[in-house]
Amino acid sequence: MTAGGATPGLVRADAWLTHRLEGLLGRLPIGWLQLRHSRTRLLSAVGGVAFAGLLVLMQLGFQGALLGSIALPYRALDAHLLISASDMNTLSDASPIARARLMQALSVPGVSAVTPLHLGRLDWRQDDGTLRTLDVVGFEPTTMPLRSEGIRRQQPALAEADTVMIDARTRGIDRAKLRAFTPEATLVLELRGQRIQVTGHFEIGGGFAADGYLLASDQTFLRLFPSRSAGAPNLGLVKLQPGADPATVAVALRQRFGMADDVKVRTLKEAIAADQRFQQTQRPVGLIFGFGVVMGALVGIVIVYQVLSSDVADHLREYATLKAVGYPGRFFLGIVFEEAVILGVLGFVPGLLVSVGLYAVVAAQTGLPMELTAARAGAVLVGTVFMCTLAGALATRRLARADPAELF
């Protein structure tokens, strides 16, 4: 230990950082030296910035998981265009459409096939009493509405009555037990008072509204949802002929439907973007995540402002003396900005490290697509530095108004 109580390693790191900042700034790093002088205040400020950065990173992670989970089922569909009810905002609220509309679409040049898809949602009570919400997708077993080769290999078994395939990434289920079943030891689900046999599994993953997915034949689907009709599916999956342009065919389909306002035609990309936009702006969960990002930024600004404002107040006489001998205002602004940038960078690092661990924990426990991308981390770093710089600019207002003659 040194006389000041610091370890030799910290002393060397301090000296190295001071030397680097001096070379970078072309002058003595006054801002860093002032921050370093009060280690308690420095640690408090770094902790506050780290907390604010962590809050923003987690809120962005949840928002990204929301958008990612919305896109997952769309990307599993083997289609170029979607025909849906005009009031559809999300897959779960798609109203039924007349099957005759899908027959009309087959007459449009460029269309190769149109597959009807039934969508529903139900609760499954497990043996331990817990409930799992499942989105059910029904289709004719002879069609190929999904891209997965694994699903297509297992799909013929759905022709049997009261059979389903279950999403192995469904939240809260025993995945080992699910993957271990055999024809001799089948898994049976109690769904709406009916015994439904699981014949296979696949992987999509749940979202914020449902825990996972079930695939069923259209006949099994109608037994689970007796109020639904075979002549009124929720979606029409449009496959195009080789070389056909999706945008051109979409225009032709809209013209074929004429003035009818009961259906709309979109590409998968357009449908995903519309669903994500609706969830972000109209549903509470999307608004909450956006509000959390704003709150995290405000927390960081307040903490850094308090630290820098106190630092300016503590050294106001010194600053006033330098001001009296002719140092310009930008010199003092540069010192405070130097402190702000240092606090931003130092606070971002621990916030990032903690968020990496939390992302992994949340993804493992919930199955949500939580991913900390380099672009997101970089954006939060830039935002953190900007946040601290803004707080520094606010903290220098008192110094700008200070009159050296009134301080002595």
Image (cartoon, grey):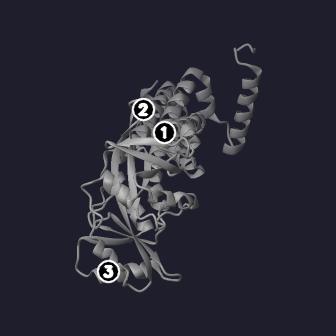
Q: Viewed as shown, does residue 195 lie left or right of 61?
A: left
Dividing the picture into quarters, in which one does residue 4 lie? top right
Circle 3: residue type: Gln
Circle 2: residue type: Asp
**Tag 3 secondary structure:** helix
Is label 1 in contact with label 3 (beta carbons under 8 Å)?
A: no
Picture residue at 44% right of the left edge, 52% below the top: 163
Q: Is residue 358 above or below residue 278?
A: above
Disc 3 designates what residue? 104
Q: How many marks?
A: 3
Q: How far apart are marks 2 and 3 (CA)?
A: 46 Å
**Tag 2 secondary structure:** loop
Residue 404 drawn at (x, y percent):
46, 31
Q: In this view, does 93 lie above or below 17?
A: below
Whichever of labels 1 and 3 marks the residue nearer the N terminus, that label is: 3
Picture residue at 38% right of the left edge, 52% below the top: 136
Residue 91 drawn at (x, y percent):
36, 57
**Tag 1 secondary structure:** helix
Whichever of labels 2 and 3 marks the residue nearer the N terminus, that label is: 3
Single out the residue that lies furthest toward the front: 184
Dividing the picture into quarters, in which one does residue 194 lie? top left
Asked whether 387 or 176 is in front, the reply is 176
Disc 2 designates what residue? 127
Q: Is residue 9 above or below residue 325?
A: above
Look at the image and tell me whether residue 207 can be seen.
Answer: no
